[in-house]
Image (cartoon, grey):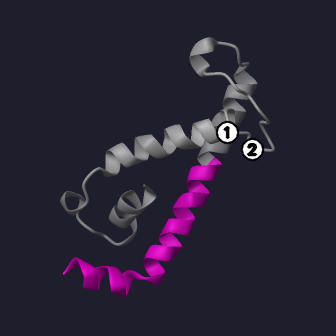
Amino acid sequence: MLAPYTQIRTLDIEAHHIAGASSDSRQMTLLAREMVTKYDFSDKVGLASTDFADYGLSHETQQAIEEEVKRMLDEAQTRAQTLLKKHQKDLHMLAT
């Protein structure tokens, strides 16, 4: 999911060559939020199994969730950039 978005940003590939990067970004955010709120992937937040629409979370908890989601996405972005840069030559060879 992260690769097309990261390819555009990391390898200077034109956006029209990569389909669905915007949709991928949206899906990544939703998945990361579920990992934090439903599947207990965050030691900082713990299990906060409710949606924002339920208005059951305090402002502080909502903020903590958003910070954890951002942290997870930033870490994934860094890992994806590292892998893409490491294999950049191979990726360009495949693209031609």
User: Which residue, given by chain and number where applicable, does mark 1 sit on?
Assistant: 36
Q: How crowded is mark 1: few (under 14 residues within 10 Å), some or many (20 or more)?
A: many
Q: Is mark 2 on a helix, strand or loop?
A: loop
Quarter of the image with the N terminus is bottom left
Q: Name the residue under label 2.
A: 42
At label 2, which amino acid type do we have? Ser
Amino acid type shown at disc 1? Val
Decide: few, some or many residues near mark 2? Use Cα within 10 Å; few <14, some 14-19, many ≥20: some
The earlier-in-sequence mark between 2 and 1 is 1
Q: Do the residues labelled 2 and 1 touch (CB within 8 Å)?
A: yes
Residue at (72, 35) in percent of width and height? 64
Which corner quadrant of the image does residue 88 belong to?
Answer: bottom left
> Where does the magenta region start and end?
71-96
Where residue 95 appears, as percent x and y from the top left, is 23, 77
Q: Distance between the residues labelled 2 and 1?
A: 5 Å
Image position of 77 (left or right of 14): right
Q: Is the magenta stretch mostly helix, strand or loop?
A: helix
Q: In this view, does 35 lie above or below 86?
A: above
Image coordinates of residue 71 in percent, x first then y, are 64, 50
**Location of residue 13 with respect to 42 vertically, above or below:** below
Q: Where is residue 48 in the image (x, y as percent from the top left)?
A: 73, 28
Tell me, yes or no, whether the highlighted magenta stretch contains residue 60: no
Q: Point out the image quarter for the C terminus.
A: bottom left
Asked if residue 52 is positioned above or below residue 84 in the image, the reply reads: above
Kindly state the secondary structure of the residue where label 1 is placed: helix
Tell me the residue at 62%/13% (across/down). Answer: 54
Question: Which numbered tag is attached to residue 16?
Answer: none
Q: Quadrant of residue 13?
A: bottom left
